[in-house]
Image (cartoon, rainbow, N blue to C red):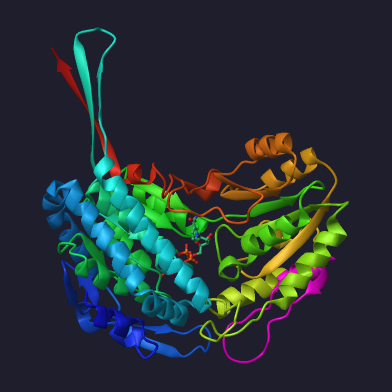
Amino acid sequence: MSAATTTDRNSASIDPVGAVPKQLFIGGEWRDATGGGQMTVSNPATGETLCSIADATPADGQAAADAAAAAQRDWARVAPRERSLILRRTHELLLERVDELALLMTLEMGKPLPDARGEVAYAAEFFRWFSEEAVRIEGDLSVLPNGKTRQMVIRQPVGPCLLITPWNFPLAMGARKIAPAIAAGCTMVLKPAPQTPLSSLALATVLTEAGLPPGVVNIVTTTDAGGLTEPLLRGGVIRKMSFTGSTQVGRLLLNQSADTVLRTSMELGGNAPLIVFDDADLDVAVDGAMAAKMRNMGEACTAANRMFVHRSVYDEFARRFTERMTALKVGPGTAQGVDVGPLIDEAGRSKVQTLVDDAVGRGAEVLAGGKAPSGDGYFYPPTVLSGVSTDSQMLTTEVFGPVAPLIPFDDEDEVVALANDTEFGLVGYLFTRDFQRSMRVSEALEVGMVGLNTGIVSDPAAPFGGIKQSGLGREGGRVGIDEFLEIKYIAVPV
Ligand code: NAP
């Protein structure tokens, strides 16, 4: 890409929505949906329609899977170094286009522009990380205990994959699957969420420019998710499904995958506890709580959903945290200085309001926020609730909004039991200056990830994922590529 083009792409005058292809991406070509169906994409800050794009039918989904299957054999034979270079170029191109992609993401999803830029960089980093992993797919050779046979272990691409992603991180959730799948030598069909498909379509143009061969990545946008994906899960062409979304939909997809014993990776919902002990550095704890709660307006699987604060520091923590929450500026993500954009849609916002009303009805005190404003867009104010009763619905449900329930506790065993009292097990946060306690509680929490004196755990170089009903498998880190590889053992008598 020339320097002039780069400058153009990063100039404020570019129309990122206009620049995105509005069709399905199948076999390296852009095409309309069978029958010409269209779906609309809207801006959650205004409720206005941004554009119309192709609305794929199940036949289009099958065509995408067939294109992935047709490309699989040749793609698996491409040298790892070549796959690595394509990933590396993708990383660079994403960063060159950061302003354009961030604006596109803010328009379709709502998050403030600085956060959207951060997500582009985060997504780009998955491509860099897996460009480095693509050339390190190792095997094993050893002598069996009988002394005669050698066992050779090789790792091979699992085959065509179906990737299904949510709307909350429109670029990063796809990148976290596409990059390791490319690195492993797999082809794929991506079905992004219908609220935020434009970031994925823009990514397809970047991948093409980076030199990805036709058919390796196929993208189908649809309003008929179940109709399109169920036949693929049951059909035998797709060899692996990787899903990020709610536990409820994850369960359904696991059921649909059972008939063909499909390999699956599931990144599902969370109900993260955040624990502030009496020996915590309260400045660090408040910073961590802000990050863990307010990243992405609270619309994150890693969002702190229950904040347990030791009774001896409860009032002071509540005062400082509420001060910070109240200072946040709410508004359209494109406006200068905005910290909190709109929620994704009216359904998301009314769910948040219902949960707040339920907690208040059970005796919670509102320290900040608590009521949706009138007017356009799906805005909700940063909200702090104190003394939330343990039978409140928000303690067992993902709030997915900027609402922090505070609950006092008295001792370590009690709070660990409360933290683990959920079917979810994605992440937990704890704040303490006592080393022994930090180890004890980190080990006792039933989660896949722990933030110890920090409210941020996500990093492309770290294994992201949950236990219990928060998921199966890990994305990112050294193990992320394993989700897309099969192990084959070859017995060699000598
Ligand atoms: P969702 O309703 O489960 O949808 C996720 C994706 O699945 C969307 O593309 C959706 O498309 C599709 N889908 C829904 N029903 C389907 C079906 N029957 N067959 C095939 N596909 C189907 O979740 P969401 O509201 O988009 O995202 C929020 C959820 O994602 C939260 O629970 C959050 O915790 C979770 N999440 C988890 C992680 C993680 O890494 N653990 C990361 C981010 C988000 P349609 O909308 O068209 O149905």
Q: Is residue 49 left or right of residue 434?
A: left
Say whether residue 262 is magenta: no
Closer to us: 150 or 63: 150
Where does residue 299 sit, x and y in percent of width and height?
Answer: 56, 67
User: Residue placed at 59% from the left, 71% from the top?
Assistant: 297
Closer to us: 69 or 132: 132
* Number of numbered discs visible in the structure rendering: 0
Residue 136 occupies which quadrant of the picture?
A: top left
Q: Is residue 147 visible?
A: yes
Q: Is residue 293 left or right of residue 418?
A: left
Where does residue 76 sit, x and y in percent of width and height?
Answer: 16, 48
Tell me the magenta residue range: 356-384
Closer to us: 229 or 315: 315
Question: Relative to residue 103, is residue 461 depicted above or below?
Answer: above
Where does residue 184 sit, x and y in percent of width and height?
Answer: 26, 47
Residue 494 occupies which quadrant of the picture?
A: top left
Question: Relative to residue 319, is residue 111 depicted above or below?
Answer: below
Q: Is residue 165 visible?
A: no
Quarter holding the N terminus is: bottom left
Residue 34 occupies which quadrant of the picture?
A: bottom left
Query: Which residue is situated farthest in the front direction here?
Result: 3
Q: Is residue 401 left or right of residue 24?
A: right
Question: Relative to residue 262, is residue 62 depicted above or below?
Answer: below
User: Residue placed at 44% from the left, 84% from the top?
Assistant: 42
Say whether residue 369 is magenta: yes
Question: Relative to residue 465, is residue 314 depicted above or below?
Answer: below
User: Residue placed at 50% from the left, 78% from the top?
Assistant: 113
Where does residue 120 sit, x and y in percent of width and height?
Answer: 41, 68
User: Residue placed at 68% from the left, 61% from the top?
Assistant: 287
